[in-house]
Image: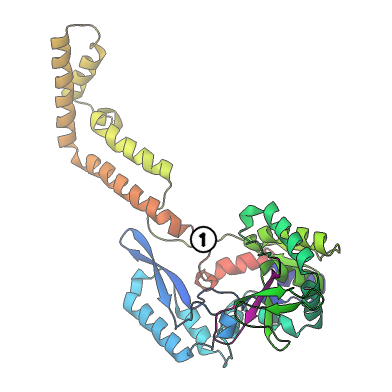
Amino acid sequence: MATANAALRFDAMPVNLIVDHDIYDIQKLAVPIKCGHRMDILTIQMSAYQAEVPSGCQPAADVSTVIEKLVHIRDHHGDALQVDLSTVIEAYGTLAPCDTMAQQMAALIDQLITPYTPACPNLFSSHFHQLPQFRDLVHQMEHDAPHCAKCYNAAVLQYPNAGIAMLDIHKYRIELPLWLLCWQQPRQRVYVDIANPSRPRLVTDQQAVTPDDLIAPRSVLMSAVMRSICCDLFVHGHGGGVYDHITQQWWQQWRGTPLAPMAVASADITLDFDVPVNNFKQLQKAIWWKHHLPYNLDRALNLKSSQVTQKHHLISHMNDDRDKTRRAMAYEKIQSINRKLAHANPETIRDADTAVKLAIQGLCNQHIAQRRDWCFAFYPPQDLKTLADTFT
C-alpha cells in the first residue's frame, strides 16, 4: 500500500519483489480458533510442500485440492473459526494456471490485495540471473572474492542482531552470498575456487557452476542488487530494515559507490476476538484480589451488620490488650466473622476465583490476540480500507 501510493505520488513504477528462492512453507495457513474462553491456532497445510526446496523451484499446488481442504475446514469448525476463509477460497477459484508455487502464491496475493491497492508488477528473485547487470556483478565478485567476502564479514560483525551468517573464507575456497537453484532440489551454497587465482571458478560442495545454471542472491546481496540496479527506492519491512544496514556498509566498503535509498514501511492491525485478553500485571491484580477478598468482604461490598460492627470493634481494639491469649481469641473471632461473611456471599468469592482463571487464560490468549501477521485477507475489509486511506 505504501509503495504503490508513493509511486503514484512521484509518477514512478512500483515493483513487488517476490523472494521465491527462499525456504519457508508457504502452504501453511495459520488460522485463529476459539474453544470457549481459550484462543488457539489451527495450522492448515493447504497442500504438500517440499521443506528444503525453494517455492520457486516447486510446481504449483493443485487448486481444486486446496479449495476442497479449505471448504472442509470452514464447514467442520464452524463458529470456532475466528476468521472467514471464504475470501481466500474464492481467490483460489479465480487463479490461472501457474508454473511454480511461488508464482501461484504471488497471483493469489494480487487477487486479495486488489480491492485495497493496485497490484503492481512482480519481480521474482530467481529471475535475477536474466539481468546482465547481475551477471556482471557475480563476475566481479568471482574475480575479487577475498576482498568481497572480507568486507561482507566485517559488515556482518557490526550488526550481530540481524541474523546474517558470515561467509566461509578458506585458502583456496571462498563463499559468496549466492545460491545455486535447481528444480525440485535444495538450494546450494556457492563458492569461488581460487586454487588457480588467474582462473577463479564458481563451485558448490557438489559440482561446478556453469553459465547456464540458475544463480540467486542471498538477502544482503539481493538488497544491494535492488538498490544498485533495479530501483530508485527500496521499501523494506522491519526485518529487511535491520539487515539492510549490513548491505549499506558492505557495499560502501567493497564497491565504494552509493546505493538507492532504503525505507521501512510497517503497520499494526490486530483482529478482535471475544475472549479475555490481559497482561501479566492484570493477572497479578486478579490473584491479589482473590487473596484479599475473603478477609475484606465487608469493605469490598460495603456490608452493614452486627457482625461487621463487631469485627471493626475487634480490629480497632486489638492493640489495647497485650495479653497473647486474649489477642489470639480476638483474632480467631475476626477470622470466624470473615468465614461467615464469605459463606453469606459465595457469588463474590466465586467471581474472584473466576477472574483469576480468566486472567490466566487471558494471558495465554494475549500472544495470539496481539499477533499482527495473520493472512491479511482475514482482516475486516473496512480496517484494510482505512489503512490504505492513510497513505493517500
Q: Position of residue 95 (x, y in %)?
A: 55, 89
The quarter of the picture where residue 31 lies is bottom left
What residue sits right under mark 1 in the picture? 270
32 relative to 361, above or below: below
| Residue at the far front in the pictured view | 195
223 relative to 201, above or below: above
The quarter of the picture where residue 74 lies is bottom left
Q: Where is residue 299 in the image (x, y as percent from the top left)?
A: 29, 28
Going by the image, does 260 lie left or right of 323?
right
| Residue at the far right in the pictured view | 257
208 relative to 144, above or below: below
- Across the whole image, how many numbered discs are drawn on residues? 1
Judged from the image, the secondary structure of the residue bearing numbered disc 1 is: loop
64 relative to 299, above or below: below
Going by the image, does 148 lie left or right of 180?
right
- Which residues make up the magenta segment? 171-187
Q: What residue type is labelled 1?
A: Thr
The quarter of the picture where residue 172 lies is bottom right
Q: Residue at x 53, y 62 (%)?
A: 372
Q: Where is residue 335 in the image (x, y as percent from the top left)?
A: 17, 25
Q: Which residue is drawn at 32% across and 50% down?
A: 358
Inspect this view and state whether residue 129 appears: yes
Inspect this view and state whether residue 124 appears: no
